Amino acid sequence: MRCRRTSRIILWIGVLLAGALSPAQTPRTPLRYELRFAAPNTHLLEVTVHADGLHGSTAEFAMPAWTPGSYRINDYAKMVQEFSAADPQGRPLPWRKTDKQTWRIELNGTNAATVRYKVYGNTMANHWTQYNQLHAFLAGPATWMYLVGHMDRPIELSIAVPEGWRVATGLVPLGGNRYRAEDYDWFADSPIEISDWERQSFTVGETTYHVVVHDVLGQKDFTRFTADTRKIVETVVGMFGGRAPFREYWFLFHIWPDVGGGLEHLNSTQINFPSTWDADGYAGRYGSEYQLKLFVTAHEFYHAWNVKRLRPVPLGPFDYTREAHTPSLWISEGLSSYYAQLAMVRAGFYTPEQYLESIAELITEFEQMPGRRFRSIAETSWDAWFQNTPPGDTNLSNTNYSYYDAGQILGHLLDFAIRQATANRRSLDDWMRLLYERHALPRPGFTPEDAVRAASEIAGKDLSEFFRRYVEGREPLPYEEYFGYAGIEVERVPQSAQPWLGATLQRTDEDSTLVVNIEPGSPAELAGLDRGDMILGADGRKFDMDQLLQTLAEKAPGATVKLMIQRWGQQGTLTVRLGSNPYANFVLRRVENPTPLQQAIYESWLGLAGRAAAQNSLAADKRTR
Ligand SMILES: [Zn+2]
């Protein structure tokens, strides 16, 4: 312990010396940003930046190309107009653009400059800015330029808030609509909602949580959702030792037509839902729309640990000019989904049976992805940045798949592997906590090797083979073995009696059917069907898509069907010999007579052990009273 202390002192001296000798230090005075609003129907925000402490002959201001957490290039510079720069006396300073996103100013001997620009925003999405008569929602990277080389300086923002609106943000409030961020990363990471939103707050541990809702679909009461969010918060915070790494946290929700998605931030999240709080329709494998809302909320909240603080090395400090590739997004995103849905079981929002059904559906869909043959899970993570290409313009629908789904499935296998190896004394939760302890901010993040090493340490045995085969490799996932550790039987119900075409079809406005994808090696491909073909009918009769699907479903594997198609304006016929469906439907169910270890793994994994004990003690309480 003494040794460590000495080395730290030496390190500090080194840092101080380096600081003193540095020829061009960036000052610690804040950069001052101001925000004003043009008329709402222009969708223009007016930004002013006062920067002092400049040195050299030029200064560069740049607009990010992307938003951390949203792995696609958006080139926010295209939203900027009317850029200008002036010295402190108001004299214009000349400038020119040096690439797609950087404005270089000639300082002409001054060491301070004021920059002005307008930024357009009219898109309701997590990673875009929108300003209209209803609200201003500001996504940091879509709004704020940064001063190149000064990104670690604090930032102060003052907002000329339009009458009747208020500000909700995770930025540090200074009073009077002024806010502070400790550096540009924090500033850009703090979305800002300015409108007449509603708020409910609660406290867990030492942290206050704000649920802010801007609802244009009818402002239904969200008290139930706030109470349920609190249970999610308690479960996730509990997993990380009961203490959150922030004193305040902001859930910023929009209930808005035709939106979706959430984006994680250091002490906030911004989530968009297209339906009201009381909507309870079917939401696929998530159950109901309400359960899906809770799942998205849990996923984004889990990110406050996983990816915002515990992150792969390339994901921060951020280079906003270009892509940051990592093979570990299956951890950052997939395991956030794994723990989000698990937190929902542990908090009582799914029964164990509902959960197993949901995961069986996830695996069924995953195993039908043709891309499994072409990319490993590490490779899908690396290629996340291709996702902004419109589907159909690439062959990614056949060669790529979701690292969210892959990671969520792998989470189960890895968790069961650790629990089996340690007789259920350790779990993936311990692995997460160890990684967090070792690599979370302010440390530089983890490498893929760090993740493998930590897993082996927690399991008490070498797990590198697992990562080599199933993360970096493309080997089929051994569901039966790993789910078996938790006493869960995996049944693959063959669908081979079903006919198989192997094309993805889409309904068109004209009551016919568009071919949007052809699976490699499928009967559709062998018959010469092509993307963009319009299927007008089959076996001599005109059909809409429902009738076509019905006709196909009634055929036996091996039967032929004559498709009437239209291609390049010409009509013709294609004869397809249907195959037999090569995929299985997965079913997960508990084994009838679990061993004590299987029973223990199952119960502690789903959080049933604690719950049963709590219920028992309640029952005992009642008896004694
Ligand atoms: Zn996410």
Image (cartoon, rainbow, N blue to C red):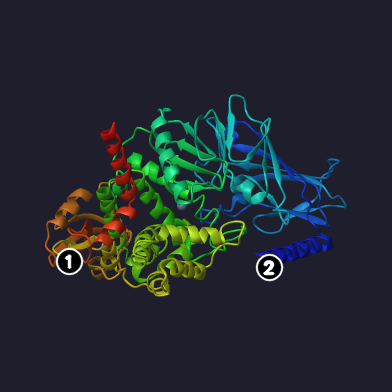
Q: Which residue is mark 2?
A: 3
Residue 525 quadrant: bottom left
- Disc number placed over residue 580 in the picture, else none: 1
Kindly tell me whether residue 247 is visible in this rendering: yes
Cα–Cα span, label 1 and label 2: 69 Å
Task: Tell which of 542 and 222 is nearer to you.
Answer: 222
Query: Residue 237: percent from the left, percent from the top?
Result: 47, 47
Answer with left or right where residue 471 lies relative to residue 268: left
Answer with left or right where residue 320 lies relative to residue 290: right
- Disc number placed over residue 381 in the picture, else none: none
Q: Secondary structure at mark 2?
A: helix
Answer with left or right where residue 300 lies relative to residue 89: left
Question: How many marks on residues?
Answer: 2
Query: Residue 48: percent from the left, percent from the top?
Result: 72, 41
Task: Please tell me how crowded label 2 is: few (under 14), some (14-19), or many (20+) other residues with Cα within 10 Å.
Answer: few
Task: Please tell me how crowded label 1 is: few (under 14), some (14-19), or many (20+) other residues with Cα within 10 Å.
Answer: some
Q: Secondary structure at mark 1?
A: strand
